[in-house]
Image (tube, helix red, strand yellow):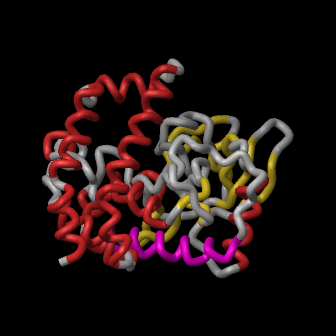
Amino acid sequence: MTTGGGAADGADSADGEALAGGMVNAGAVFRRGALVERPAPRTARALHAHLLALGERGFDAAPRPLRLTDDGREQLTWIPGDVALPPFPEWVMAETALRSVGSLLRRLHEASAAIEVDGRAPWPRELADPAGGTLLCHNDVCLENVVFRDGRAAALIDFDLAAPGRPVWDVAMTARYWVPMLDPESAADLYPTGPDAAARLRILADGYGLSPRERAELPEVIEQATASCRAFVAGRVAGGDPGYGRILAERGGWRRWDRVQAWLVAHRGTFTAALLD
């Protein structure tokens, strides 16, 4: 839901090359050579410390923070590669791509597990795990926030919505976008190939290496994550955000969200069986 450092829209300004790929920071992210400059989140200092600690533990699949500017922006290293933007290309729906996203998320979690979360930081609660947790989750592993090389997920960008939670919550949030966890009518708007949600959910879980207990929990956690995302959108629309208001109207309004949530509940058994069989 945010804008990162992997795709350029071809526009240039005095600030550098404008990057596309998100809504929250649309038009405010620029690449200048080997760095990306963007609005700094409220958690920038704690988040930068976490990203640096990830690098110290060998996780090189996230931007490295360089500095904070006096005017409230942050500078990060540019990560080269391919980022899928709507309308999504066919290659990003390949099974190898999906499995690699799960594997990359697992690598992030394993590295993050050794890093103590800064409890004083104002981590955003909008998409955070309502159950809480001790792992700093990304919470926004949408298609636009994964950098690919040679058809495989190579890096994650845009940690603005990172907050403490459980690993299964981050997997659920990721599944929403990458499976995707949408009813067929809703999925057809962005994914005309008609993906098999149950089969793709299993591939993502296998790529991550989800435990049997977490597999049993995952369908219901996806329902909870979908409700959180709906509340996130509702808050943006109520606040007068024109981008979210336009997307909501273009994609069927709240009736679409109602349909997705009802479909998830109706197919919970199907998803559980696919994950555990």
Residue 124: quadrant of the picture: top right
Residues 23 and 113: in front is: 113
Residue range highlighted in magenta = 98-115
Which residue is depicted at the point 42% across and 76% down? 103
Q: Position of residue 134 (x, y in %)?
A: 62, 65
Q: Position of residue 210 (x, y in %)?
A: 38, 75
Q: Position of residue 193 (x, y in %)?
A: 14, 54
Residue 60: quadrant of the picture: bottom right
Question: Is 277 a magenta residue?
Answer: no
Work out which quarter of the rendered image holds the C terminus and state it.
Answer: bottom left
Q: Is residue 9 visible?
A: no
Q: Is residue 160 visible?
A: yes
Majority SS type along the magenta span? helix
Which residue is depicted at the point 35% across and 29% down? 247
Q: Is residue 95 left or right of residue 65?
A: left
Q: Is residue 15 left or right of residue 235?
A: right
* 231, above or below 118, in the image: above
Residues 192 and 195: in front is: 195
